[in-house]
DNA sequence: GAGTAGATTTGAATCGTTCTAATTTCGCCT
DNA sequence: AGGCGAAATTAGAACGATTCAAATCTACTC
């Protein structure tokens, strides 16, 4: 029994070849399971590979073959459970397809996103899955990633125009329809004073959700008051802070709110407390995303299920398809969302 | 003004060199900002780099220089907010140090962890940050990563013995002390029947936390009843399911529980409902981790703050230090945790 | 105008793999 | 024994960068 040396040089194909008296080329063939090589040679080589503890150098192989075995995943905020789930889905699918995920986090800053993309692209990913920062612009992203690397955009549109030769794929959520459903649900519960709470209007996803809300209100002949639109950063903390603004106007106070997303909705729940109201009793709330906490909060949150993990898998599938056929026309998929009714969307008192 | 070709071959050093009549070597020097090259040449080359839209091929450079510019991060469950925060911290620090993060997720399965490590190692990361799966074993991990790549273990010990020549660094939480503090806090509140809830005893972190709990109980002269130890998978769902077991024994029912972590604690809150109890009123609960939901739940959760993002940064720092000095003796850091008292740890009725 | 120290530039080898084209080996037939 | 086709193996040039030693170019000095 040979002892594996605990430390030393890295083992290469040459070492293996020398170790069992064949050429480098043969070892390479064995590695890739070519049928060309003789049974007994193969066995001999495989034994030697094991004995020396060889590890494949994929970077070298990729260099020679001009291929890539990685995909860059750039997320605007990894700590948000919605995106964490998404990332887990992406990694799962890429992993089983033999790709490795290069992670990047932009912290929702376009500037940082640019730097991160620039650094990732140097590692030669086969493609990029990008969930853009709020204020990210098409032109700048294109400059960072170049025209050789396919991109799948998730969740948000980029600002500005994309040149026609860059055909990127898109995976978006049906924001408009989802928000409309949530609003219709609240209206059916009997609410007439319904606010739209959270998010920033310069982000495409916010605008779409707000549009769905407005449509439902108009269709029901209900007014959309300006003081019922409260913006906030899409985090729990900031939403809790902004809650008070809902009740500051001189007009009639809302009895319900359609929230930009679950984080904001959960923040609003807390903020309501400080204004003497309780979600699910005297104020109705809906969220968006169905993060895992939504079903566990008290009251549990009525929201739109987006299945972020499944979306992650889907985004990865889209990119893999594009790698298989780079010439295919680029496409946009609008993933449906589903209303999940829970306790937070009570009827008015 | 040259128009950048929207599509075509990848640009290499040769193209740049040819494009402005210098040698490949000179261009390489310019790229790395060597002081050797003449001002005017440098300017000419830089202009050409921009004009042709050159992107650096880090893989080729790493091959030649026998260096690495990536670090693998293997997480047992990325969708868990505690680990998502940790990952964000790791990526942040690695990114600013010029490394890219190779992501891998093991889903808390040792088998999958092994496969993921095997795949990542082929990409030649400079090091590995590993938060092991519950049943992960030292021997198998070593076989997967080999002896050339430094490893930083986070959060859990591996099963079995590690050969002495593999000196890996460790970043652990002060589980024992934290659980002791939580238990002492409950005792001070007046509780005498205190359970330890959730987690699996074969994981090192669970055993340590249980030990801290048992120490505090003994020190206070309180009994540790067998039926007050309920195990569960460390997820909210399974914890909610297992809640009932706390009240099945014939002995006296507990009035408080020290929980393995926040996820389990939040699950227990829910489970209590189904047994006619309410956390923060007639049953006291403590968690562990201080995930962002802990402060937002109702009642808010008394827990131990572990600052996962800071831990991520710390783990990355440890690995970077090890890369700087591979010969340094390996070390273990036990990060302190801090008790955060909130509403869930009420006194007994 | 030769000699020389410095400042720049470059040719060629190299990293670990793949791949084409060529070579060697082998069994089998006449 | 020689010839032939199939099977198995291999030499050597890539891939895109870095790096060392050597070559070339300056600017001065004597």
Image: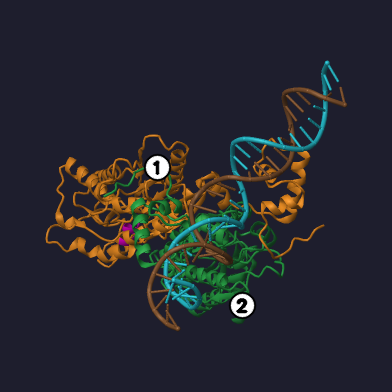
Chain colours: A orange, B green, C cyan, D brown
- Of B277 and B343, the residue lying toward us: B343
Q: Is residue B198 visible?
A: no
- Of B72 and B195, the residue lying toward us: B72
Compared with B162, A327 (above or below) is above
Q: Which corner quadrant holds the N terminus of chain A?
A: bottom right
Q: Which corner quadrant holds the C terminus of chain A?
A: bottom left
Q: Between tags 2 and 1, which lies in front?
A: 1
Query: Residue A109, percent across and down?
Result: 32, 61
A15 inside magenta stretch: no
Q: Which dot marks residue A2?
A: none
Magenta range is A262-267
Q: Chain of mark 1?
A: B
Compared with B295, A314 (above or below) is above
Q: Residues within 10 Å of mark 1 (few under 14, many from 20)?
A: few
Tell me which label, 2 or 1, sits earlier in the chain: 1
Horizontally, residue B309 falls left or right of residue A44, namely: left
Q: Residues within 10 Å of mark 2 (few under 14, many from 20)?
A: many
Say which quarter of the image contains residue A322: top left
Horizontally, residue A181 falls left or right of residue B211, namely: left
Q: Which dot marks residue B8?
A: 1
Residue carrying label 2: B215
Element under disc 2: helix
Q: Chain of mark 2?
A: B
Query: Residue A303, percent across and down?
Result: 34, 49
Seen at 29% across and 51% down, the residue is A139
Q: Give the spatial CA distance, label 2 vs label 1.
A: 68 Å
Compared with B64, A324 (above or below) is above
């Amino acid at each position: 029994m040979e002892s594996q040396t605990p430390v030393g040089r890295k083992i290469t194909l040459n070492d293996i070849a020398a170790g069992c008296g064949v050429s480098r080329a043969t070892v390479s063939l064995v590695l890739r399971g070519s049928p060309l090589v003789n049974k007994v040679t193969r066995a001999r080589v495989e034994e030697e590979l094991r004995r020396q503890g060889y590890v494949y150098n994929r970077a070298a192989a990729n260099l020679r073959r001009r291929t890539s075995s990685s995909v860059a995943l750039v997320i605007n905020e990894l700590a948000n459970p919605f995106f964490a789930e998404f990332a887990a889905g992406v990694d799962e699918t890429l992993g089983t397809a033999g790709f490795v995920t290069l992670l990047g986090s932009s912290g929702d800053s376009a500037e940082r996103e640019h730097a991160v993309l620039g650094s990732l692209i140097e590692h030669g990913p086969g493609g990029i899955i990008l969930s853009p920062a709020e204020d990210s612009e098409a032109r700048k992203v294109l400059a960072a990633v170049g025209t050789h690397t396919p991109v799948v955009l998730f969740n948000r549109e980029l600002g500005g125009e994309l040149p026609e030769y860059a055909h990127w794929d898109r995976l978006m959520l049906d924001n408009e329809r989802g928000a409309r459903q949530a609003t219709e649900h609240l209206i059916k519960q009997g609410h007439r004073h319904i606010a739209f709470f959270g998010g920033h209007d310069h982000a495409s996803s916010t605008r779409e959700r707000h549009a769905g809300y407005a449509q439902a209100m108009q269709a029901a002949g209900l007014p959309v008051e300006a003081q019922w639109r409260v913006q906030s950063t899409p985090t729990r903390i900031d939403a809790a802070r902004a809650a008070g603004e809902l009740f500051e106007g001189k007009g009639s106070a809302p009895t319900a709110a359609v929230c930009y997303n679950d984080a904001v909705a959960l923040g609003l729940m807390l903020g309501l407390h400080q204004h003497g109201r309780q979600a699910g009793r005297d104020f109705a709330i809906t969220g968006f995303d169905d993060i895992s906490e939504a079903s566990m909060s008290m009251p549990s949150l009525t929201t739109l299920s987006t299945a972020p993990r499944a979306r992650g898998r889907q985004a990865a599938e889209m990119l893999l398809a594009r790698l298989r056929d780079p010439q295919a026309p680029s496409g946009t998929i609008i993933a449906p969302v589903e209303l999940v009714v829970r306790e937070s969307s009570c009827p008015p008192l």
